[in-house]
Amino acid sequence: MNRDVYVIGVGMHRFTKEHIPLRDMYFTAGMAALNDAGIKFRDIGSLYNGYIGGAMMEGMGYAKDLGLTGVPVVHVENASATGSSAFREAAWAVSGGAADVAMALGFDDMMRLRMGRKAPRTPGGKRLPSMENLMLPAGFFAMWAVRRMHERGTTIETFAKIAAKNWNHGRFNPMAQRRADHEVTAEEVMASEMVAYPHTAMMACAMGAGAACAIVATEEWARKHAQGRPMVKVAASQSQSEHYTEGHVFMGAVVGPPSLTQITSRLAYEEAGIGPDELSLVHVHDAFPIEELMYYELLGICGEGEGDRLVHDGETAMGGRIPFSTDGGLTARGHPGGPTGLAQIWDATRQLRGEQGKMQVDGAHTALAHMMGAGSICLVHMLQRV
Amino acid sequence: MTKMLPLEDGYMIIPEGGGEAVRLLGSYSKAADKTYFPIRKLCPVTAEPVETVDLSPEGMLYSWSFIRMPVMGRRKLDESGGQGIGQIDLPEGVRIQAPIDGRIGDWTIGMKMRLAPHPVVTDDDGTHYCGFKFVPVRAEQ
């Protein structure tokens, strides 16, 4: 990055399955971030709206509730990585000098998504689905899991332990969609309905609605608005689309080859000058537990084939060596699409400022936020307390 | 005889009459000596031109699952309670994702699978519009 970039404010509207107008959620998250930063909307030099579904210019319309300041507004869409991509655009706007302060605001309701094209019809008028829609995310990740079980002897219990951990992390997150009223066990997760072998319903991410916002700024702005809190620097922002691999799946590859995470994270470590051993906490695209398990290894948190041991030793749970998905992750905090990556930034920033109460990782100083977007794209951000 | 057509052009050939096997269409890059599915406009590795080729109708099962989702073209689960899906590696180095016939217990990673048409929509005149699926070779015998 050309200029150092800092996160100066974060805000969210809790993720939920309730019907709440997106316009209201957008406003809540945006105002929360502005208040957190101690600035006004007129201070924002560039705004990046992240959402997947929705009407043309929907975000532009919602932004008018924050003010008519003439600020440039851009719609960003990168599937599940939409919020992370909006954050990256905002960070680069500040780094490149286009703005001193920029806002990334993600919102969405996954239940309204209409993916794909307008379907052609048969001569008799029947709708013809696209060949490209043969595979669903649930099935795609389930096949990762079955292959992992075949190659490494991973058990369903391991997947259940990862999901239970994330359900339990979400219990203390006021922004989480799923907040269990009891300690969730691996047995409970395994007993829930099988939806895509070996994944059960409680292993699948929560789909709902919500909004999340992050404001980034120059060092000068960050110092001015630190309010006595530690400053949070964007130590790395990396994004990669797919590279060719042997056995490359072009059709229905929800997130591309696993090496995508490896390549992107290595670039981030290099940019930040920080290695995986120096991380305090990690957020990943844990739509299903097989993903989190594989990302332990692909992010270099442990060696190849050692992920299962991390789970069974509790190293990725709160209080462990390197907690993952400290806010419940996609599993419990939820995955509305547009705001998901920004919810990671919300938790990471507050963790580094020591503000997360029962969710707090003691002494957190460096966080990594990883996100995948179908199609596919990988983003890795690293935040550091300074 | 029932007429079968692909759901979309450019992915597969369903020969009329049933005398020949159904086959998928891929792209071969001479520059990279690699084959891709589905058809590419250029070689994704070298950006050189590619030629359209027929792919082998048989491959090995790389992974599988059984998902509690309606089969393509349906809105509700049928009596099977879901569908099998698989990743099949073809000899050309191509990995294909598709529905697979069978239930949990029928599949073993590494087993031989054969391509077959997968009727998705049937028009009023009886024409079947097809995607593709793979069938365990063992189960066919």
Image (tube, grey):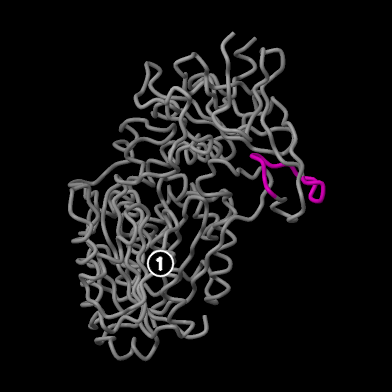
Q: Residue at x 51, y 20 (%)?
A: B105
To which chain does the residue with label 1 belong? Answer: A
What range is drawn magenta here? B29-41
Does B64 appear above or below A265?
A: above
Above or below A81: residue A159? above
Residue A12 relative to residue A241: left or right: left
Q: Quadrant of the C terminus of chain A?
A: bottom left
Q: For this rendering, which residue is in front, A186 or B22? A: B22
State yes or no: residue B40 in magenta. Answer: yes
- Quickly name the residue at label 1: A86
Mark 1 burial class by Cα count in 10 Å: few <14, some 14-19, many 20+:
many
Amino acid type of the residue tagged 1 in the rendering? Ala
Dominant SS in magenta: loop
Q: How many marks?
A: 1
Judged left or right of residue B56, residue A142 is left
The correct choice, above or below, for B37 with respect to A339 in the image is above
Q: Would you identify the image quadrant in which residue A318 lies?
A: bottom left
